[in-house]
Amino acid sequence: MVTLETATQDLLTLIAHDEKIPLERMQGIIKKLHEEWYDTAGSMKDLSLEDMQRMGIPSRVATALMRKLREIAVPRPASMPQSRGNALSDLLGAVGDRAALVECVRTCQAIVYNIVGNPTDQRLWEIRLNNQKFQQRVGRFPMAMAYLEHLGFVKEGNVIRILDLNYGAFLEALKELNSAALGLGLSSKDPPAPQTAPSAPAFDPYKSISISTNLDIPRVLTRENDPAVYTAQIQALSQAKEALIRQQSVSRSPVIYHLPADFSSLSLRRAALSPDSEETITPEDENLMLQTMQSLLRANEENSRFQNKRKRQLEQAARRKVFTKVAIKVRFPDATMVQGTFSPLETTLDLHRFIQSLLADQQRRFYLYLTPPKEILQPSQSDTLERMAPATLLYFAWDQESECYIGETTAGNGPFLSESALQAAVPFPS
């Protein structure tokens, strides 16, 4: 029967037997749980399925583990023996909730046990006070912190650390904690021998060497290059950026301009331009195309490097500037231009509706496009205007009727914008 005191290794061994999973596949999972201070079934009772999956535990094992944890029988309270240390006695008497006391003693026992077993590893000499698990199990009890100070821990800012290790005192403290743990129904932790570097085995020329290539063994030792980690960071970055954009209120601020004559001729030529046209490229267009080509070459060079795809996406998202406003100008063939301000989260459908509200004939189909090369901007609820930040120039044309405007005049077609919009027009600033 599984209880709160069942060791993690025993519990995973039982799951391996029930699920017909080779025991060697469980070793990495057991090690990972021990590193996270989950050494008994009771310490894992608050874990969710999502928490286990974030630690890299396979879904099959995590589901079986959750099923076993729900079957745990809570032991009855047992009488507690008198402790030999005054500081430990004060701790045992100060924590009234038995479940909280069990977790507190278990955690203190694990801290002292690790230091006794690895006295030269100074990483174990320091505990961060903002560690959520430590704060929940030990840090919130003043008598528990007093007990750690009695052992030699000194508070320095946001951490407590040992400045000078008294190995004999910690060895004696482990015996006291083992005695208190037995009174609470916990298991005793025998003092381990200090770890030393293993000696190299003697070479045996007649002994075969086998190397496992089983790719089904779960890799839970490190998640440095796990795509799921980068995906979560990209989503968090996107959410933070979206929250920043939503905090900024954007006023449409429409402005309608009368363009000079030289702008008008250029607009008429570009309105008739098609992707297959042999129109002469202006120096401005050539400079824009050169910049675009250089940007593509830099992107291809970065993509050619051997790098995690999600990591590269995260770096690109972190370098990308955040714009809270997008200024969009739409040039019409009749020497007028409309300018509006949008949020990057608004869509191309919002842009089309804004232009449609200013037209003289709002029932007539039209389209907006970029050039060069000519790219028609389709109205869509999913295509945001973020890619047009901070400013973009678009062109207007009637749908399937742009041939009518080839030439120097738009006679017979009437004004594009409504009378109220034209009355509010101002000269284009020089």
Image (cartoon, helix red, strand yellow):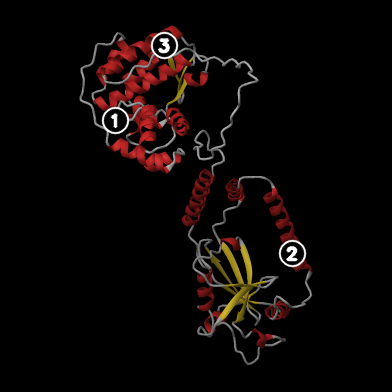
- Classed neighbour count for the residue bearing mark 2: other residues with Cα under 10 Å, few (<14), some (14–19), many (≥20): some
Where is residue 324? Give x, y as percent: 54, 57
Instruction: Work out whether residue 374 or residue 182 is closer to the camera in this orientation and state it.
Output: 182
Q: Is residue 300 left or right of residue 157?
A: right
286, 78: nearer the viewer? 78
User: Would you identify the image quadrant in which residue 226 lies?
Assistant: top right
SS at circle 2: helix
- The residue positioned farthest toward the bottom in the image shown: 412
Is label 2 or label 3 in front? 3
The structure residue drawn at horizontal position 70% and vertical position 54%, both measured from the top left corner, is: 300
Q: Secondary structure at mark 3?
A: helix
| Rendered image: mark on residue 170 | 3
For the residues marked 1 and 3, what is the alpha-carbon distance in whole angstroms?
A: 31 Å
Q: Is residue 111 visible?
A: yes
Residue 151 position within the rendered picture, expressed as x and y whole percent measured from the top left: 40, 13
On the question of residue 130 being in view, the answer is: no
Return the residue found at the far top.
Answer: 168
Q: Nearer the viewer, mark 1 or mark 2?
A: 1
**Viewer-side residue, 416 vs 294:** 294
Quarter of the image that includes the C terminus: bottom right
Badge 3 amino acid: Phe
Residue 289 disc label:
2
Mark 2 to mark 3 CA distance (whole Å): 71 Å
For marks 2 and 3, the one nearer the N-term is: 3
The residue that disc 1 covers is 2
Amino acid type, mark 2: Met
